[in-house]
Amino acid sequence: IRHAFMARKATIVRRLEVRQAADAKARELVGIQQQIQLANSSMQGAVPGSPYFNDANAHHKMQLLQMDQERLEMEASMSDEQATQSADHAKEVAAILKQEVARLAKIRKEEWILSMMSLAVSMRDSARDVKLVWEKSSSDNISK
């Protein structure tokens, strides 16, 4: 059962690590989305090539941000799926551990009942022996 508890602990640690990685990807994705929104708002509708457009590399930067966004969306989705699978695995291990603990508790209860019955029988025999000793000693004292 010690191994079962260690396996449970390992799955919980794994679940936590995978969930933290998925959350980090989600935060990174939110950061990219905010950068895209900021870049769109800073352009204020200016068209590249117009005299009001200050950044010649803005279109290229926007494409890079959008590529990063697509990559991060895919990575975040995969990380979230891994976190879900890890959580499901942790639940399976927990269910198995719970069944194992219940099985061992049942066995120990049955063993305890049998040992109590054995103890009661030996106490009864001991009491009977003590009674016989007292009866014999009292009958010896009466006959003298």
Image: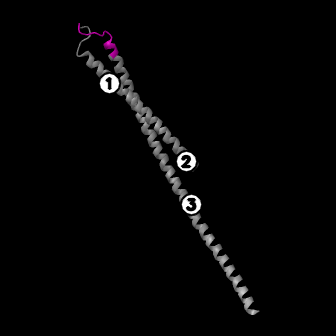
> Could you classify mark 2 by the number of other residues whose Cα lies within 10 Å: few (under 14), some (14-19), or many (20 or more)?
some
Colour theme:
one colour
Pair 2/1: label in front: 1
Residue 79: x and y, percent?
A: 42, 32
Write down the region rendered in magenta: 51-61
- Residue 42, how many percent across, how many down? 27, 17
- Per the image, the residue denoted by label 2 is 4
Q: Is residue 39 left or right of residue 112?
A: left
Task: Look at the magenta stretch and give its main secondary structure.
Answer: loop
Name which residue type carries label 2: Ala
Q: Which residue lies most toward the right here?
A: 144
- Residue kind at label 1, given as amino acid type: Gln
Query: Residue drawn 41% across and 28% down?
Result: 75
Marks 3 and 2, Cα distance to the nearest angstrom?
A: 17 Å
Q: Which residue is mark 1?
A: 34
The answer to the question of whether label 2 and label 1 lie on touching residues, with beta carbons closer than 8 A, is no
Position of 137 with respect to 11 (left or right) is right
Instruction: Check residue 107 in the rendering and tell me which mark sits there, or answer none.
Output: 3
Q: Earlier in the sequence, mark 2 or mark 1?
A: 2
Find the residue positioned furthest to the bottom.
143
Is-magenta flag for residue 60? Answer: yes
Q: Secondary structure at mark 3?
A: helix
Q: Can you say whether 75 is above or below 14 in the image? A: above
26 with respect to 94 (left or right)? left
Determine the secondary structure under disc 1.
helix
Inter-mark Cα distance, 2 to 1: 45 Å
Q: Earlier in the sequence, mark 3 or mark 2?
A: 2
Q: Which of disc 1 and disc 3 is earlier in sequence? A: 1
Marks 3 & 1, CB-CB < 8 Å contact:
no
Residue pictured at 46% horizontal, 38% vertical: 16
Question: In which quadrant of the rendered image does the C terminus lie?
Answer: bottom right
